[in-house]
Amino acid sequence: MSSLLRSFRWGLKLPLIVPAIIIVLVDDAFRAFVVPSVRVLARMALIQRLEALVAGLPPYGILTLFLVPLAIIEPFKIYGLYLLGLGHILSGLGVFFIAKVVGLGLAERLFAVGRAKLLSIAWFAWCHARTLSVRDRVHDWLTTKAFWRYAVRFAAAVRGLARSGAGKVYAFLASRDGGLVAAARRRTGIG
């Protein structure tokens, strides 16, 4: 009887577990390249001035800036999925990708700037803690699976190839004697 009850409970959880896993994996994949890019942008003087203005807002002001853009961007993600469902693969992926990057980038910076004030709002802090708990549980569960270890190795290999390729492309573009940047400098008379 107890194994039947466990199976029943597992069956009820499954529709929630599968989307949670997918959401965590997609967010992690996007976060891996969005967060470093956003940090580079955060070094710009204009962005630093805007962040100082945001940091001076009260908690609910920052919350509004945090939630309103996300509320606008989320429908675009759904629209991207809708386009995918219609068979418009490139359009759907493009819309979803742009919405995901912009939404994650905005959320990342706004949260970084207003973290202390946002977490001073009790219900927001509770939701944040629950979200991190779900993410951590999904990660813990995934790390026990063999397919995850293979996926991690594969992702590391792809990242290594991308870094190597990006380094070679940068070296070519930046080389003074034969790169594209050098050619552009010669044509424009700069440098």
Image: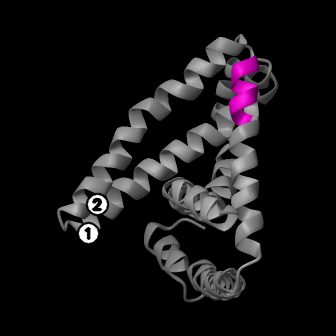
Reading the image, the residue beneath label 1 is 89
Report which quarter residue 5 is drawn in: bottom right
Q: Residue at x 62, y 85 (%)?
A: 158
Q: Quadrant of the C terminus?
A: bottom right
Magenta segment includes 124: yes
Q: Amino acid at mark 2?
A: Gly
**Callout 1 touching callout 2 (CB < 8 Å):** yes
In this rendering, position of residue 59 left or right of residue 71: right
Residue 36 sits above or below residue 3 on the image: above
Q: Nearer the viewer, residue 115 or 51?
A: 115
Q: Nearer the viewer, residue 185 or 95?
A: 95
Residue 4 position within the rendered picture, expressed as x and y whole percent measured from the top left? 60, 65
Q: Main secondary structure of the magenta part?
A: helix
In this rendering, position of residue 174 left or right of residue 85: right
Q: Residue at x 74, y 28 (%)?
A: 126
Residue 127 position within the rendered picture, expressed as x and y whole percent measured from the top left? 68, 32
Number of residues whose C-alpha sits closer than 10 Å to that of mark 2, classed few (under 14), some (14–19) or many (20 or more): many
Residue 16 sits above or below residue 93 on the image: above
**Where does the magenta region start and end?**
122-128
Q: Amino acid at mark 1?
A: Ile
- Residue extending farthest to the left is 86
Reading the image, the residue beneath label 2 is 92
Q: Residue at x 70, y 86 (%)?
A: 146
Residue 147 position within the rendered picture, expressed as x and y whole percent measured from the top left? 64, 85
Residue 91 position within the rendered picture, expressed as x and y whole percent measured from the top left? 25, 62
Q: Which mark is residue 1?
A: none
